[in-house]
Image (spheres, rainbow, N blue to C red):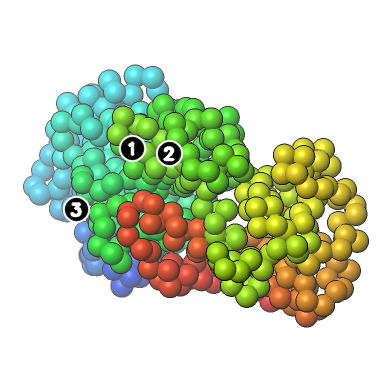
């Protein structure tokens, strides 16, 4: 079950938003009465109850907005219990002062918006001593270890528990709590109001993560990177899992640069089945693999990891295959034993020298293309060119370098910087050039717009993204991916982005 948090400054606005939530199909709402600018009128608020509710009056010390008298706050909670609300949220330090009455269920909670205490398990056990129906632990997490520790509390809880590690690094706890017995999780309903760091919007939690389908038997997959919030992988893979009736869920893990080892150390207890790897970890993860395919060895980059028994990690590079397929398809089809690749002898300029650039450069070299690499940092371009066995040019010379194919692997032009382009208009002067931008957010980048205006053939990052995701899906499940559904899901997620 998903509990949507609602808090408004006026009684009438609170009632209106509650009614809107009910129309949207919300299972239950948390009424944050501490947001009201006047003293709460419980009889007025609870006269109409469109959905079941959790009543919360959060103090400032716990991250709330209540600034009134503490005795009055506790009196309001007792009144709510007497009026028969479904749940009342009672902080640990006052749980002994609010008695059980009637059918109202007790959420005994602990909130810490600054840190995750070392003795968090002791705090959980204290909560369990105050006759709870549900224990809620919500603490700020700044490391993967802290977030992991909060979620792990649920595995040994005496009764139902909601574990929440607040902050982006703990987003996965809001989804996976259900796997470990959480009766519900909290979500945002009004996008203009954020009640806690890392809280997921209701629609995203419901659709992108298929939250209601998660259970104790769900296999867990992850996507790791930094940043990770904009990743399309969870929505795309979860839609495909759902379409094929597979009990699997992909969740995001914010893994800061240099924290890969900590990720695998702290979260192996989740029994992860696979991981999609994004910036900046595609190269750093290679030494952590016990086995890898040839494409990973050649490119020195990995974007897909299968995790086998005893934590054995096997790496793949689906970027490599997807990029080659996207380009060859746009240029007349893949090469076969009987015919050469359409990339043979083509002059290709690659912008960038990161993990994706490495994968594409090695793929092009194997197909007989003449590759040139440029990067804002000339020394990085030179190093990659030496490894691939191709040439490098300075960033300032990129627009004057003649090429049949132009490929952008840099983040220039990525949302929200929609008006930026890695190449000036002068670079698209020749007719017949193929321009490939690996950015998929947005699909229609400024670079591709300029290229089309000058008669170039274009390939978008969406095509590559869907292809690589489909290959990943086959590796994860052993089944062919529902490619068109994946493509539709990408389009849906990108639809709010300005395209003109």
Q: For the point 70% across and 63% down, which residue is it?
A: 344
In this figure, which residue is indicated by the disc labeled 2? 314
- On residue 308, the disc is 1
Closer to the camera in the image, 349 or 244: 349
Where residue 128 sits, quadrant-wise, is top left
Tell which circle, 3 or 2, labels the residue nearer the N-terminal end: 3
- SS state under label 3: loop
Q: CA distance from mark 3 to mark 1?
A: 47 Å
Relative horizontal placement of residue 412, taking residue 75 as reference (left or right): right
Closer to the camera in the image, 120 or 270: 270
Please say if the residues under marks 1 and 2 sit with CB atoms less than 8 Å apart.
yes
Q: Picture coordinates of residue 59 (x, y %)?
A: 39, 38
Q: Is residue 473 above or below residue 486?
A: above
In this figure, which residue is indicated by the disc labeled 3? 85
Q: Is residue 283 above or below residue 430?
A: above
Q: Quadrant of the N terminus?
A: bottom left
């Amino acid at each position: 079950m998903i509990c949507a948090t609602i808090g408004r400054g006026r009684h009438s606005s609170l009632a209106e938003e509650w009614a809107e939530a009910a129309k949207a199909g919300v299972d239950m709402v948390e009424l944050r009465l501490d947001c009201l600018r006047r003293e709460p009128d419980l009889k007025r608020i609870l006269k109409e109850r469109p959905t079941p509710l959790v009543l919360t009056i959060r103090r400032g010390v716990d991250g709330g907005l209540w600034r009134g008298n503490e005795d009055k706050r506790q009196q309001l909670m007792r009144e709510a219990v007497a009026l028969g609300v479904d749940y009342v949220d009672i902080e640990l330090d006052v749980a002994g002062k609010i008695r059980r009455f009637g059918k109202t269920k007790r959420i005994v909670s602990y909130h810490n918006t600054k840190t995750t205490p070392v003795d968090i398990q002791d705090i959980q056990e204290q909560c369990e001593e105050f006759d709870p129906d549900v224990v809620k632990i919500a603490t700020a997490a700044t490391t993967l270890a802290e977030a992991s520790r909060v979620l792990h509390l649920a595995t040994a809880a005496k009764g139902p528990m909601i574990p929440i590690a607040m902050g982006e690094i703990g987003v996965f706890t809001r989804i996976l709590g259900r796997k470990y017995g959480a009766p519900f999780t909290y979500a945002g309903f009004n996008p203009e109001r954020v009640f806690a760091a890392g809280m997921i919007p209701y629609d995203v939690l419901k659709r992108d993560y298929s939250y209601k389908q998660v259970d104790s038997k769900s296999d867990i997959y992850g996507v790791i990177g930094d940043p990770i919030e904009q990743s399309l992988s969870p929505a795309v893979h979860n839609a495909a899992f759902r379409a094929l009736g597979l009990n699997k869920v992909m969740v995001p893990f914010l893994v800061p640069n240099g924290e890969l080892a900590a990720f695998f150390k702290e979260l192996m207890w989740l029994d992860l089945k696979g991981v999609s790897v994004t910036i900046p970890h595609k190269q750093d993860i290679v030494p952590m693999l016990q086995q890898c395919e040839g494409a990973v060895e050649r490119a020195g980059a990995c974007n897909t990891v299968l995790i086998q028994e005893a934590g054995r990690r096997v790496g793949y590079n689906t970027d490599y295959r997807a990029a080659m397929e996207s380009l060859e398809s746009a240029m007349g089809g893949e090469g076969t034993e009987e015919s050469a690749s359409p990339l043979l002898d083509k002059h290709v300029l690659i912008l960038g020298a990161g993990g994706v650039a490495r994968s594409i450069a090695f793929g092009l070299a194997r197909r007989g293309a003449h590759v040139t690499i440029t990067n804002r940092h000339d020394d990085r371009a030179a190093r990659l060119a030496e490894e691939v066995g191709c040439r490098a040019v300075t960033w300032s010379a990129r627009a004057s370098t003649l090429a049949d194919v132009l490929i952008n692997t840099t983040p220039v032009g990525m949302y929200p910087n929609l008006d930026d382009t890695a190449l000036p208009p002068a670079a698209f002067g020749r007719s017949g050039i193929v321009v490939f931008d690996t950015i998929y957010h947005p699909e229609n980048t400024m670079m591709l717009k300029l290229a089309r205006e000058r008669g170039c053939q274009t390939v978008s990052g969406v095509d590559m993204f869907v292809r690589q995701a489909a290959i990943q899906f086959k590796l994860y499940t052993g089944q062919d991916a529902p490619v068109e559904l994946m493509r539709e899901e990408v389009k849906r997620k990108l639809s709010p982005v300005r395209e003109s």
